[in-house]
Amino acid sequence: MSGPPMTSFRKPPGRGSALPESNPFQRLAALLGDRAPGADPIVLTIGEPQHAMPPFTAEVLAENMADFRRYPPIEGTPAFRTAVAGWLDRRYGLGGSIDRERGVLPLNGSREGLSFGAIAARDQLAKDIERPAVLLPNPFYQTYAAAAHIAGAEAVLLDTGAETGFLPDLDALPPDLLDRTVAVYLASPANPQGAHASLAYWQALIGLARRHAFYIFADECYSEIYRTSPPPGVLEAAHALGAGYERVIALNSLSKRSNLAGLRCGFAAGDPAFLARWVKFRGLAAPQVPLPAQALAVRAYSDEAHVIENRRLYNEKYAIAERLLAPILGPVTPEGGFFLWLDVARWGGSIAVTERLWTEVGVKVLPGAYLASDRPDGSNPGEAYIRVSLCAPAAITQQALERLADWLGGTA
């Protein structure tokens, strides 16, 4: 949980706004411009699942096609809430403690909940401070910064490097910062590094949230993409503490677990008081999740066979990565997720390596610097790394990693 003392807490540059001027993929497009790839191009940038959808997908949608005529209830169907609560019980051993009426909400993918959660946290807490804080890991999923921006909050960025286990150092957070915090965003497995938060880590964060009155938005969309051991969840940690789910909201979806990113169907679960108030805001401001999508979610959350196969396919590609890259870089396999987070500092850092990989061997990756915010001294906690997606089929992934390994091994 702890690491070296943190030296600074900061917001992204630009007139106090937490919203970056452009997303990482726009920055990558500007970096590479119209330069031709050095070989037949292979794109390993976007985390868009390419494995098969569950075999029952078309059948369930066809059976429920007529329900596209209907406006869905904003709180979701009873079957959806029951299916999600049941899956959470089985996955995290919650013993039926999730409130199926007030403790589960459908979302248009977890991104919707992440985007608007900070507004609800700010409004529900109503802290009497000039500008609340939202704490984000650095590097971070850019939606977290957008959430802070639209909530009018200061995005406070917390470095998550190898020295802190790629998670924020909770022991270094000053009490005055925590007192003005309304929300903390944390992904486990982490994007991009794949690190897991332990049960003890989650419990320490829950303790801080309850002492200093802020909400935890646990981004668990990669929860089922792991190597050997399933990562603990924030609800599991809260349940073990035995005091309910106050201040705790887990967000997840079918995008990664079931390769249904285009379905835009996810959920928020946890603190029933928070969710009961949030559903009123969403009833005015958010689109409902279509009933056929909820029906497919009911089926998907009741089936683990496709999830096990999905995980096997990712782990097969990690084995390829380990075989090809570990002799050059050392171990490269993270605990979870479907990215490689590769330290390429000795080859010139993330931006230079990204340019050269594209123009020399035709492999497109994402610079780690584009997933992080600069420190006050101009340095960047992601600058040493590139993020490599393992979403492509195994044969394509192997071809790309062979090029990467040859380039790393042959470049001074």
Image: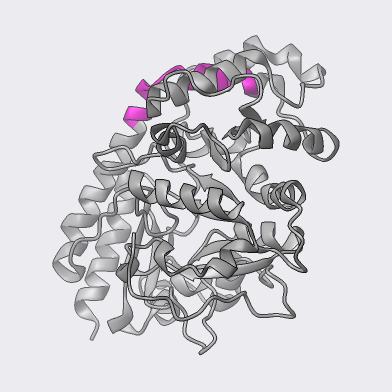
Magenta span of residues? 294-309
The answer to whether residue 160 is left or right of residue 398 is right
Going 37% across and 72% down the picture, which residue do you hit?
A: 385
Residue placed furthest toward the bottom: 377
Q: Is residue 158 magenta?
A: no
Residue placed furthest toward the top: 63
The answer to whether residue 256 is left or right of residue 402 is right
**Who is closer to the viewer here, 222 or 12?**
12
Above or below for 368 versus 224: below
Quadrant (top left/top right/bottom left/bottom right) for the N terminus: bottom left
Give the quadrant of residue 195.
bottom left
Above or below for 391 versus 172: above
Can I make out residue 387 in this image? Answer: yes
Going 55% across and 18% down the picture, which residue do you hit?
A: 298
Residue placed furthest toward the front: 211
Above or below for 3 versus 1: below
Going 70% across and 20% down the picture, which residue do you hit?
A: 291
Give residue 288's position: percent from left, percent from top. Answer: 75, 30
Give residue 86's position: percent from left, percent from top. Answer: 48, 18
Give the quadrant of residue 50.
top left
